[in-house]
Image (cartoon, rainbow, N blue to C red):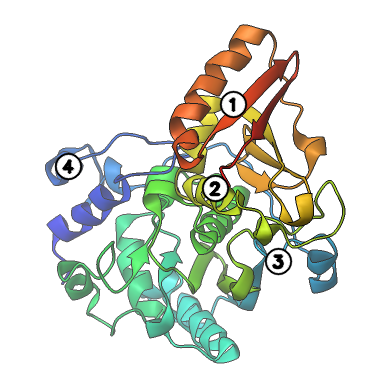
Amino acid sequence: IIKYSLLSFISACQGYDASRYSQFQDEYSLEQVMNSRKVFDFLTLLQCCPTSDGAGAAVLASEAFVRKHRLENQAVEIVAQEMVTDFPSTFSENSCIKMVGYDMSRLAGKKCFEAAGLTPGDVDVVELHDCFSANELITYEALGLCEEGKAGELVDRGDNTYGGKFVINPSGGLISKGHPLGATGLAQCAELCWQLRGQAGRRQVPGASVALQHNIGLGGAVVVTIYKMGFPQESRYVIGSAASSSGDGDLEGFKAYPVFKEIENHLLQEGEKLVRKVGGVFAFKVKDGPDGREATWVVDVKNGRGSVTNDPGMCLNGLNGKSAVEDKLLWFIDAFASKLDGFIFFISSNLVCFLIVVER
């Protein structure tokens, strides 16, 4: 028997630190969830996912394509994926739990773990279909995250959130993020890719290396997917992978190399916030390379979650007016320049360049 307050607690957790893409941005207390308008029996309004509009996309690429375009640092591998449809038991056993997909979720999860050579205990982060709070608890058991009948104990131990055995629905789940039907599964996929890449910001699950996705449509099919980084040895962007402006060479030999690694790490942790605040792209021409070589790095604090590259062609930032550029430049200096021994800069109408002078 699941306590009513436990279902409400599940819903309250889903509002915690939700993604900026979430439909619901407010954090609710357990009492607010329990006291919200009753929808049906033990379910209140805040235990139900909202009706949503949304869109999502995923780029599926071959290993050859990934290597050709040097995308190893961000490529996420679909380790295993299984789809299962309704069992006869869905219709013949007069069971509400089986009607909402328990049997097909259990089989899809079992087949997926077998295909991947993994167990539920190997999973770090999960995005599952929590259309209602009760469905989340049922799915814990169906996927093998706990024994049958033990979902309540898993929650009581804190093993469904940060600091516990698993982190489940760090995006906020359907209850917080919303449920735009066809885009729901892609939203789960996006969150898990961000988690594996270390790009989830405040929602980041420390050391996440195995991700599990569960998506269901009643009447009925379920898809369970396991993800890992495709090239874990390159799962952090390796600056210097492109050629320098003076030709081929080992850019790690530049004294400024650690500076850009530090900037890169900062973007990995807080990229979304920095992009919203800065909105600029900065080119750095470095002159301290081995044998007098020069190289150009570009720090993009305008697009996506930010990036560090060696492509000078990316440095047009689209800012209008010198004052706008200077405002963003001052913030950039405050955020990053303490890592530099010294620098001078110049500004042109649509381009910000730093000429870094590293003390020898």
Residue at x 50%, y 39% (from the top left corner): 341
First in residue order: circle 2 vs circle 1 = 2
* Disc with the residue nearer the chain's start (2 vs 4): 4
Tag 4 or tag 1, which sits nearer the N-term? 4
- Disc 2 + disc 4, Cβ < 8 Å: no
- SS state under label 1: loop
Q: Amino acid at mark 3?
A: Glu
Give the labeled residue for mark 4. 29
Separation of disc 2 and disc 4 at Cα? 43 Å
Q: Nearer the viewer, residue 33 or 304?
A: 304
Secondary structure of the residue carrying numbered label 3 = loop
The residue wearing badge 2 is 259
Identified by mark 2, the residue type is Val
Relative to residue 231, is residue 238 depicted above or below? above
Which element carries disc 2, helix, strand or loop?
helix
| 343 relative to 208 in the view: left or right | right
For this rendering, which residue is in front, 221 or 114?
114
Q: CA distance from mark 3 to mark 1?
A: 26 Å
Q: Earlier in the sequence, mark 3 or mark 2?
A: 3
Q: Residue at x 38, y 36 (%)?
A: 24
Amino acid at dot 1: Gly
Query: Residue 279 — which label?
Result: 1
Label 3 – label 4 distance at C-alpha = 42 Å
